[in-house]
Image (cartoon, rainbow, N blue to C red):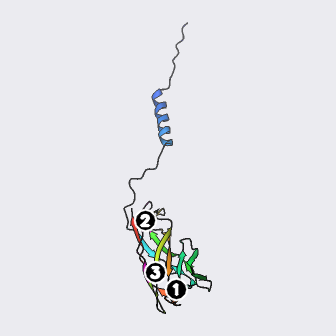
Amino acid sequence: MMKNSTHKTKRPGRLLIILTTALFLGMTVSVKAQEPPPRPVIITANPSQPLAFGAFSPGISGGTITITPSGTRSSSGSVVLLSLGYTYAPAMFYVRANPGTVLSLLATPPVTLSGSGGGTITLQISGSQPVSPFVTTLPWPQQTTLLVGGILTVGNIGSNPPGTYTGSFTITLVRE
């Protein structure tokens, strides 16, 4: 007697399609078509934190007072730093730019500040935090805080009498 048996075999094509689909689904990658359009860099001053050097006495020969971007104060020459309750701080600015924008702080020439009791002193902008050049990382419209220090050059007590010295300076950022 003879037996007829039939064997059913699975098609290898269907298994291959299932495995290939599973492989592609497991390897998905996020893709972006293009970056956001360029926006102009916007810089605004924080009016509550201008560059301030605090109270000091120029002494017999004068010298310099330095405010670093991190907010420390030092002097050279015969300048004596006084603690009379006057604040000292770096200037604070807010910068808005697309993430990944490379910016450099352009060095400006020294500016002259005029005293309320006569006399003039010279201000040179010096250093920034973050250090120039820097890359903005925050998404638009969030803003990066930029702190800027300076060096004040003063003469002797005769040429720089006590009083308030005021003036203005310009901050220029260059997009690289």
Q: Give the crowd class for mark 1: few <14, some 14-19, many >=20 residues within 10 Å.
A: some
Q: Which mark is residue 72?
A: none
Q: Which residues are magenta?
A: 96-112
Question: Foreground: 147 or 40?
Answer: 147
| First of labels 3, 2 by sequence position | 2
Quarter location, residue 39:
bottom left
Magenta region includes residue 8? no
Does the stretch in magenta take in 97? Answer: yes
Q: Which callout, 1 or 2, points at the residue further toward the start of the chain?
A: 2
Q: Is residue 161 above or below residue 97?
A: below
Along the line of sight, the residue nearer the viewer: 102 or 81: 81
Q: Position of residue 165 (x, y in %)?
A: 49, 86
Residue designated by label 1:
156
Q: Secondary structure at mark 3?
A: strand
In this view, the mark in front (1 or 2)? 1
Whether the residues at callouts 1 and 3 have beta carbons within 8 Å, the answer is no
Residue located beneath label 2 in the image: 104
Tell me the residue at 44%/59% (across/down).
100
Looking at numbered disc 3 in the image, what kind of residue is underneath it?
Thr
Along the line of sight, the residue nearer the viewer: 154 or 10: 154
- Residue identified by numbered label 3: 122
User: Is residue 80 in view?
Assistant: yes
- Quarter of the image containing the C terminus? bottom left
